[in-house]
Image (tube, rainbow, N blue to C red):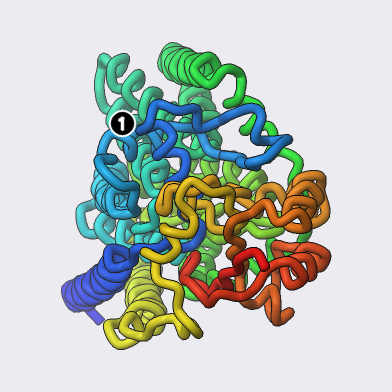
Amino acid sequence: MDKQSSKTILGSALLISALTVAAAYAMFFCYALSQNQAIEYEGPCLWASTQIARGLNPYPLSTLSQSPYTVIIYPPFYFIVCALFEHGEPNYLWPRLISILASLFTAVFYYKFLRRYCHKRTSIGGTVLLMSFMAIWLWSAKGRVDQLSLALSALSLWLYALSQGTKTPVLTLIASALALSLATMTKQPSALIAPALILDMLLARRIKDAAIFASGFALALLSMLGLAQVATQGGFIAHMRFATHMPFEWRYLSERLALMYVDWPKFILTLLALPLSVIYREKLSNNPLRLALLLLLTTLPVTFYTAGTAYSNVNHFLVLLLPLPLFIATMVESTAQAPKMGRVTALMYGSTLLLSGALLLFLATALFSPATCQRKLALNPAVEPAELKRLMQGQLVLSEDGGYGPLFGAISEPVDITTFIQVLGLDGSQARDMLKNVEAKKYAVVVINHQEFTGERKMAQWDKATIEAVRRNYRLLGQANGNCEVQDVYLPK
């Protein structure tokens, strides 16, 4: 195969993979915008943004230890952005639109970041690979903090790369530091990028630049943290600290990695790219290999720890995914001048692009195709949202869907049940207090996942005593949608 034929085939693979990845995103965007209820625990984020929109504290200190129980484990920047667009009744439309827009900007910023080191075609391919990661795709339209944090992290990386080619990089470095501090104030793991960038500058003997970036990042972040702490009357840090006591187990990490089966071709190519990029590093000027290695080393330990906690999900890997396409792009560029190895890596690269796009489209079709989306939850009998609102408005409600509060005007607890469970356990102090409320019939409505009552739920969120207490003291009204799962709705007997 000659060089021109290789380029043509690689270009075709790139085009096909880009179209398949775009189709997968379009399916999920359409699905998300058609849903009125929460997708994958969006409720706590909607609750926090609604609190800010109403001028209330999203981090009340009292709710960590007394009813109504609420914990918000993310910083407030995403919530503030959502609150700016909240007019009228709370809903998931604007939070999801913000995430969709952020996912598009993630692609733009990451392409520009790669373009500082690689040719145009390689940069496009690297961006397609990044966006084909299941974790990035599956959180691209959810009304949660993840995508905005990722977009701001990609912006920071692009600005950092931009500073390397200027004689007066001060403003660009400050802008990069500010973007990264905002990303951290959206979701904490973005802070892990800062040590990598600082170390990269120190190893390149850019001591002054490292000092500018480090001081800018620290000053911006500490100012925002201090402002949040004062504005929330001490509640902000308490809520952030509450989620720091989650136990790690290897089986949880293994389960999360297994869930990412569509990404294994990219993981394998990254492992191959590491030694090849080192061997052929001299063939690429402005080689970003050191930066990629530093990003991997600073993000991997904490990412693996958080992904290995109970009730975690694959979105915990997001910040770790950023350097992986950079490794692959570096390999492609480094080996391009070596005829034999260049053809081999081009073949592996093109095959990975095609396979990644095909696997993501397969997953999207299985989950979000028009035929799949037309299937509604089998609710028997169905309790309509209007009826839920009539029953819940102004009342104390027990529900694992934290969005019921803002959506239906209820005082709902607990908000973010999985964090309470991870820290305090299924029978922790908050669970015992809520059990007493169930026994005393203090809740106007109880809404609990149907599989808790059948014993089919893999990861229980309620202890058996609470389930039995609900059965004794409440009567089944019907079923409703919550977190896109069947929820049983109970009223006091």
Pinpoint residue 363: horizontal percent, then vertical percent: 41, 79
Q: Amino acid at mark 1?
A: Leu
**Where is residue 21, by image quadrant?**
bottom left
Q: What's the residue at 58%, 53% (across, down)?
A: 397
Residue 237 seen from this side: yes
Residue 331 seen from this side: no
Residue sitting nearer the eye, 179 or 226: 226
Pinpoint residue 252: horizontal percent, then vertical percent: 71, 63
Pinpoint residue 136: horizontal percent, then vertical percent: 41, 58
Q: What's the residue at 40%, 63% (across, down)?
A: 37
Pinpoint residue 330: horizontal percent, then vertical percent: 39, 52
Q: Which residue is mark 1?
A: 159
Quadrant (top left, top right, bottom left, bottom right) of the C terminus: bottom right
Total marks drawn?
1
Q: Is residue 164 left or right of residue 46?
A: left
Q: Residues within 10 Å of mark 1 (few under 14, many from 20)?
A: many
Q: Is residue 57 above or below residue 134?
A: above
Residue sitting nearer the eye, 16 or 100: 100
Q: What's the residue at 34%, 43% (across, down)?
A: 151
